[in-house]
Amino acid sequence: MDEAELKYARGYIAESAEAIEAAAADSDFVVALGAIADAMTKALRAGGKILLCGNGGSAADAQHIAGELISRFESERAPLAAVALTTDTSVLTAVGNDYGYEQVFERQVNGLGNKGDVLIALSTSGKSKNVLRALDAARARGLFTIGLTGRMGGEMHGRCDALLQAHSSRTPVIQQLHLMAAHIVCGIVEKRLATNA
C-alpha cells in the first residue's frame, strides 16, 4: 500500500473503533440490545419466528443473522426459527414485477408473519420504503418490530418497538455495528434458550 492507502486504512479502523466505543458508552444502545434479546427470546419460546429484511449489505446482514439462528452461533442447540425475507428470488421478482419493489417485504410479512413473531428490519438510512412498509405491516399484524439503523434513524422512529441506532452516518460502519449488535443478541438468546434463563 502507498501512503494514501495506509492513511485510508488507518482512518477507517479508527472511525470504526470510535463508533464501537461510542456504542459501548451509550446506555440507549445497550438497553436496545436487551430489549431485542428479550423480544426474540419471548417469541422463540412461544413457538414464534424471527423475520428479517433489508437491502444490499443489510440484506446480507439479514441472511447472516438468520443463519446464526437456524444453524448455531457459538453453542450446539436446536435450530431457532428465522427467515430472511431477502433470499427467495421467485418471491422477490414476482412481487417486484406485479406490485412494485416497495412491497417485496411487506407482502412476505403479511403472508408469513403472525402475532407474537418478531420482524428485524435493517436500513442504514432509516428511509428504505420497502423496509418501512414491512414495519408498518408487521405492526398491523401484531409482530414485535425491531429496527437497526444509523445515527439519524430516518423514518424508523415510531415504527419500531425497539430501535437500535449505530453511532455513525457512514453506511459500512453502520453495517459493522449492526452485525456486532446482532452477534451480541444471538449470543444472549442462544444462552437463554440453552439454559431456560
Image (cartoon, grey):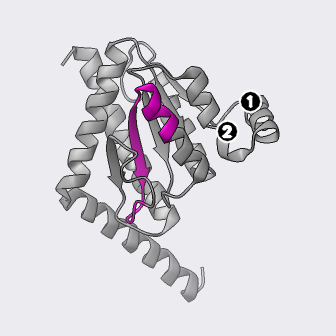
Image quarter in which the C terminus is found: top left
Q: Residue at x 38, y 21 (%)?
A: 116
Q: Identify the residue at the far bottom of this view.
A: 3
x and y percentages locating residue 51 in the rendered image: 50, 30
Image quarter in which the N terminus is found: bottom right
Q: Residue at x 57, y 81 (%)?
A: 5
Please tell me which of labels 1 and 2 falls first in the chain.
1
Disc 2 target residue: 104
x and y percentages locating residue 28 in the rendered image: 21, 54
Disc 1 target residue: 91
Amino acid carrying label 2: it is Val
Q: Residue at x 41, y 17 (%)?
A: 48
Q: Is residue 64 visible?
A: no
x and y percentages locating residue 122 in the rendered image: 49, 47
161 to the left or right of 26: right
In the structure shown, which secondary structural element does the residue marked by tag 1 occupy?
Answer: helix
- The image shows residue 165, relative to residue 130, as above or below, that is below
Amino acid carrying label 1: it is Val
In the structure shown, which secondary structural element does the residue marked by tag 2 occupy?
Answer: loop
Density class for disc 2 (Cα within 10 Å; few <14, some 14-19, many ≥20) is many
Q: Is residue 155 magenta?
A: no
Q: CA distance from mark 1 to mark 2?
A: 8 Å
x and y percentages locating residue 161 in the rendered image: 32, 40
Q: Nearer the viewer, residue 24 or 47?
A: 47
Q: Which mark is residue 145?
A: none
Q: Is residue 41 visible?
A: yes
- Magenta-drawn segment: 135-153
Density class for disc 1 (Cα within 10 Å; few <14, some 14-19, many ≥20) is some
34 to the left or right of 186: left
- The image shows residue 174, relative to residue 3, as above or below, that is above
Asked whether disc 1 touches disc 2, contact meaning CB atoms under 8 Å apart, the reply is: yes
Q: Is residue 146 magenta?
A: yes
